Amino acid sequence: EDEALAGITPLDVAAPHELPVIFDKVRVVGYPVGGDACSVTEGVVSRVEVQEYSHSLRAGLALTVDAAINSGNSGGPLVHSATARIMGVAFQKLVARGVELQGHAVPAPLIRLFLDEVADAEELSSPAEGVRQQQHEQEESGEGTLVPFRLRMPSLGCDYQPLEAPALRRSLSMGDRTGILMCRCHSAEDNSQQKQPETAQIQQGDVLLTFNGHALDNNGFSDLLGRRLHFAVARDICQVGTAVPVSVWRDRAELHFEHLLRPAQYLVPRGQYDTRPRYFICGGLVFQPLTHEYLQGWSINDRPAHLQDLFQRGHLTPLRNEVVIISTVLADAVNTGYDSGWIGAPVVHKVNGEPVRNLPHLISVVRAARMHEATDPQLETFLNFEVSMSGGPFRFALPAGELQAAERRISAIYGVPAACCSEHYLDT
C-alpha cells in the first residue's frame, strides 16, 4: 500500500558502469530466517568476477561478499556503506564443507540492464506486447506459453578455449596477437538463406581478438569497468539483438565485422521457471523434452550418463534444437514387450526414418502418419521410433491402427487427458 511507503526515501541503484572495489564495506538488508524484523549484516567485497548463477546455471558477473547471506536474503539489496547506493542484489551463497562467508550478489550493471529492458517493454504501444512477443517466440520454439517478462541474457553462440599454450598459438600463426579460440558454434537457425555474408559472423576456428572495443588476452580477460574481468562481462551488459564490433584472426588474416548477440540457448534448457511441462503420449510411450529439471530427479553423480553427456556437451543445430526422450511407458496391450515404467530414458532420434528436430516435430510426424493410416485402414502400418539408450540403439514399433483404442484405455486407466498430450499440443 502507498501509505506504508510514505516518508521513505528510496535508495539509488549504482550507475551502469559502477562496481565496488575489493575491501569496500557493504551491508546486506533483508528478511532471512531466524526472526521477523529486518536484518542488516555487514562485510566487505572480497571478489568481483564471473560466477555461475545457481538459478540459470549460466556464468555471469557477480559480487562476492563475506557479509552473512542466508535463506530469505535473496532479492534484498547490497548497500554500499559509504554511499548508501545499491551495489547489488543478494541471490545465492556457496555452501560446501570448508567454505564460509561466500555470498553472491547480482551487480549494478546487470540490474540496470534488466530495468532498461523492462522500461523498453513498457514503451511499446500495448503494455502486454513485449510479453506476447516472448510468448510467440516460445510457441514457435515449442517452449510453452503464459510466461512473464524476463531478462534474456545475450550469448556469443560459441564454445571457446584459452590460448595459453605457445605451441597452439604458433600453429595458428598469430604472431604476438592474443585472444581465445572458437571451438564450436551453436545455432538453431538455418543460415543458408541469410542475407548477411558468411564471413560477417564468428565461425568455428576463429580466434576472437577484440570484443566491443576490448582487447582479449589469451584467457579471454580484458580491462573492463576499471579492472581485469572476463570478456563475458562486456557481453552481458549488452542487450539481446545488439550488433557488437569484433575482430577475429581467420586463415592468417585479421577480420573486422559486427557480430549479432542472440539470446542464450542450449540443447538442454537450463533453469526453466513459470513454464508448464510439455509431453506427448503415443501408444503409452510418454515423450518429453530433456531438461535440467528432469535431470534434477537424480543427484549429479547418479544421472544417466547418456543424458548428462547431452546436458554438458549437447550441440544446438538447425537439425536438432531439442532432445526428446521417452520418460516412461504406460503399460498396455499395444506396447507389450517393451517393459513398462522407467526404461532408461532413451533418446529419440528418428520417427519412420525422419530425424527428430524437437517435440513439436515428432508430434507432427506421428499425427501425419496416423492420418495416412486412417485413409487406408486395410493396409497395416506402423510407427517406428529409433532411439538410443545408455547401452546402444533400440527400436520401438507401434501399430498405427490400434493406437486410438489403446489411448482411450490408457486415458481411463492412468488418468491422463483424453488428448494424450499437454495443452501445448492440443490438435485444434
Image: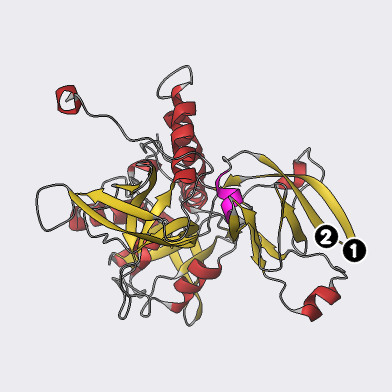
Badge 2 crowding class, 10 Å Cα cut-off, few under 14, some 14 to 19, many 20 or more, is many
Q: Position of residue 160 (x, y in %)?
A: 66, 65
Give the left or right position of residue 12, taking residue 32 as reference. right
Amino acid bearing label 1: Arg
Disc 2 on helix, strand or loop?
strand
Amino acid bearing label 2: Trp
Label 2, on which residue? Answer: 249
Label 1, on which residue? Answer: 252
Give the left or right position of residue 197, taking residue 312 as reference. right
Q: Are marks 1 and 2 in contact (CB under 8 Å)?
A: yes
For the C terminus, the quadrant is: top left
Which residue sits at x=85%, y=76%? 170
How many circles with numbers are drawn on the protein?
2
Q: Position of residue 71 (x, y in %)?
A: 22, 58
What segment is highlighted magenta in the picture? 232-237
* For residue 151, above or below residue 318: above
Disc 1 on helix, strand or loop?
loop
Q: 44 or 342: which is nearer to us? A: 44
